[in-house]
């Protein structure tokens, strides 16, 4: 049901479509699982702006999310599905049999009252949404999320709303994954992953409708480079709507880095050796 449109009773309502989710809990977050989150306004310790277009916004608490799922062989009951202002996905508050409570990413189809488990052993019927296992135990072609890159480090892949990846297979202690971008890569078979797709998949379909709603989220206005003067941006200047002052130039950042079709990943990165096929279908350099 998620996306709700409004009648144009106000100018902003004409373009507003919001992601309304009736199943979310209206209670305050679990106090023991939250931390303060001070605002930075995009400034570093010297007070200089290092991230533009940030500032203001509603006060937020950080929710401590369990990305390691290290309580093994103990069932946990889903107590609530909650909103998290720090990420696009929702969170599920789970309570283990020993009374400990934790937050996990809420996958699609996980409902309040369901029971989930994390384990190092599994039977055929155990691969249900929300359960967590090492990749070595999971059947091929399973949709996964919250996958580790390094065993024991905690989930780093496929954590955003609506994200998932596919397990291609496990061979010689290495699991092959098809990433959301289309990239194929290897990770250690002992890395843990959660069954299912991250929920709240309609998050990217909403339209805020007005500038004020973006300010509530802590986003400040942006000015396009082509609308600036040459002294302020490499793409500034020119008469009217020109691309870069006189002749058409490459679109770049204020500091001159190409903004279109420029690979920013370092070739010396150690994990490059684990990539089988890049997202654009090309194999890594030096491989046939």
Image (spheres, helix red, strand yellow):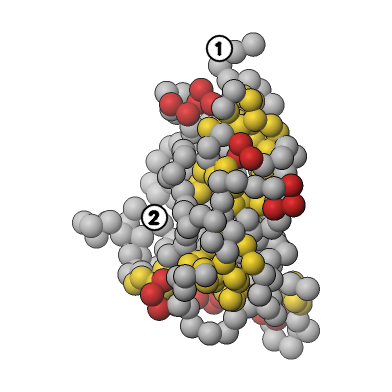
| Secondary structure beneath label 2 | loop
Q: Is residue 247 left or right of residue 3?
A: left
Q: Residue 51 got which mark?
A: 2
Residue under the image location 57 percent in, 84 percent down:
26
Residue under label 1: 286
Task: Pick whichever of labels 1 and 2 is earlier in the sequence.
Answer: 2
Pinpoint residue 178: horizontal percent, then vertical percent: 67, 36
Where is residue 270, by image quadrant?
A: top left
Pinpoint residue 16: horizontal percent, then vertical percent: 70, 75
Pinpoint residue 21: horizontal percent, then vertical percent: 69, 76
Q: Nearer the viewer, mark 1 or mark 2?
A: 1
Residue under the image location 59 percent in, 76 percent down:
80
Residue under the image location 70 percent in, 33 percent down:
168
- 256 or 76, which lies in front? 76
Mark 2 surroundings within 10 Å by alpha-carbon count, few (fewer than 14), some (14 through 19), many (20 or more)? few
Residue under the image location 71 percent in, 56 percent down:
128
Q: Is residue 38 left or right of residue 66?
A: left
How far apart marks 1 and 2 lie (CA) works out to 36 Å
- 210 or 275, which lies in front? 275
| Secondary structure beneath label 1 | loop
- 42 or 197, which lies in front? 197
């Amino acid at each position: 049901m998620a996306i709700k449109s409004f009648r144009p009773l106000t100018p902003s309502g004409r373009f507003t479509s919001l992601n309304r989710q009736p199943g979310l809990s209206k209670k305050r977050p679990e106090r023991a699982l939250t931390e303060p989150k001070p605002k930075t306004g995009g400034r570093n310790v010297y007070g200089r702006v290092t991230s533009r277009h940030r500032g203001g916004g509603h006060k937020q608490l950080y929710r401590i999310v369990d990305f390691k799922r290290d309580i093994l062989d103990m069932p946990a009951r889903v107590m609530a599905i909650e909103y998290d202002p720090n990420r696009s996905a929702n969170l599920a508050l789970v309570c283990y049999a020993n009374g400990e409570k934790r937050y996990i990413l809420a996958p699609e189809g996980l409902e309040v009252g369901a029971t989930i488990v994390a384990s190092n052993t599994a039977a055929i019927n155990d691969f249900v949404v929300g359960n967590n296992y090492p990749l070595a135990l999971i059947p091929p072609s399973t949709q996964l999320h919250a996958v580790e890159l390094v065993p024991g480090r905690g989930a780093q892949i496929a954590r955003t709303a609506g994200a998932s990846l596919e397990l291609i297979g496990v061979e010689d202690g290495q699991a092959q994954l098809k990433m959301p971008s289309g990239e194929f890569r290897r990770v250690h078979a002992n890395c843990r992953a959660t069954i299912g797709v991250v929920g709240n998949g309609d998050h990217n379909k909403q339209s805020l409708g007005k500038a004020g709603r973006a300010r509530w989220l802590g986003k400040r206005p942006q000015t396009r480079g082509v609308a600036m003067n040459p002294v302020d941006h490499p793409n500034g200047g020119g008469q009217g709507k020109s691309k870069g002052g006189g002749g058409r130039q490459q679109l770049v950042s204020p500091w001159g880095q190409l903004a279109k079709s420029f690979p920013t990943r370092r070739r010396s990165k150690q994990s490059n050796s684990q990539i089988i096929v890049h997202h654009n279908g090309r194999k890594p350099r030096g491989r046939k």
